Amino acid sequence: MKLCRFNSNRLGLVLGDEVADVSEVLDGLPCWNWVPPAGDPVIAALDTLRPRIEALAASAPRLPIAGLQLDAPVAAPSKVIGAPVNYHDHLEEANTDSGIHHGSVVHPIDQMGCFLKAVSALAGHGAVLELPFTDRRVDHEAEIAVVIGRSARRVSAAAALEHVAGYALALDMTVRGTQERSLRKSCDGFAVLGPWLTTADEIADPGAIGFELTVNGETRQASDTRLLIRSIPELIEMVSAYYTLHPGDVIMTGTPAGVSPVSSGDQVSLTGTGLGRLEVVIG
């Protein structure tokens, strides 16, 4: 099942080049007067909502996907987590390119650990990403994102995938510099997610997802999750040892070699096996 969030928080089921508007199922979600529980309410209720979504699909209004505004498929994660330097080829390029390392030695994920991106950085397919500085290098970083479906605390790698709702394509946009990653990677629009959420049952092997990023039609990055230093289950084990993962939390699993600067007017496109095409424009 492929689920999208479109046109100001409508819920859609992606069916080929159309979207079935199944927003009616949202009426059954609980309401709160003040502080809701942590996590995204749709992702938290996905197992319950799924039969109703499937039942509605046949009669729901159909809309051409091409004309829709596709927002990030997860509306309210409590955390967006980044996995730095999780491909060996990116480690090599980071230590070779002074525009990336800025005089520091870049270490792999096992030494660096993970970092947090601001939830306010979320953006979706078709977004126009404004460059926050005119004198700083901003790079694209193509990634596969994991969306947590069930709360997870101190989960073993062996049990980790039981806590996954699905997967999406992601762009971890980055201002290069000496500041902490969480600051440089949390500018508005710098956590692009989409174009939809593909549920876990549709991805036969999350350890074998191929993906490719182009800028203005030119391939810049191409890799496969087979090459991750820390696999998806290992990442879930790593971060859940430090804090509870809630439904809707997003883990960006790391970027391979090929990161490079973007400029105003660039068209960035990311495709992935079973995950669709995610496109943004640099403003």
Image (cartoon, rainbow, N blue to C red):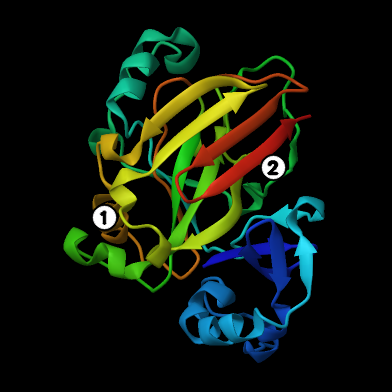
- Identify the mark nearer the N-term, 1 or 2: 2
- Identify the image quadrant of residue 95: top left
Q: Which residue is drawn at 43% across and 9% down?
A: 97
Residue 140 appearing in the image: no
* Res. 265 mark: none
Q: Residue at x 57, y 81 (%)?
A: 54
- Residue on which disc 1 sits: 233
Classify 10 Å Cα crowding around label 1: few (below 14), some (14-19), many (20 and above).
Answer: many
Residue 173: give x, y in percent of width and height.
58, 33
Q: In this rendering, is residue 98 above or below 253?
A: above
- Residue on which disc 2 sits: 188
Residue 61: give x, y in percent of width and height.
78, 75
Residue type, numbered disc 1: Pro
Q: Which residue is drawn at 23% across and 37% down?
A: 110
User: Rounded to the nearest whole Å, what is the CA distance between mark 1 and mark 2?
Assistant: 29 Å
Residue 115 appearing in the image: yes
CB contact under 8 Å: marks 1 and 2: no
**Horizontal side of residue 97 vs 170, given as left or right:** left
Residue type, numbered disc 2: Asp
Q: Residue at x 32, y 34 (%)?
A: 86
Q: In this rendering, is residue 248 above or below 127?
A: below
Residue 122: give x, y in percent of width and height.
63, 50
Query: Is disc 1 placed on a helix, strand or loop?
Result: helix
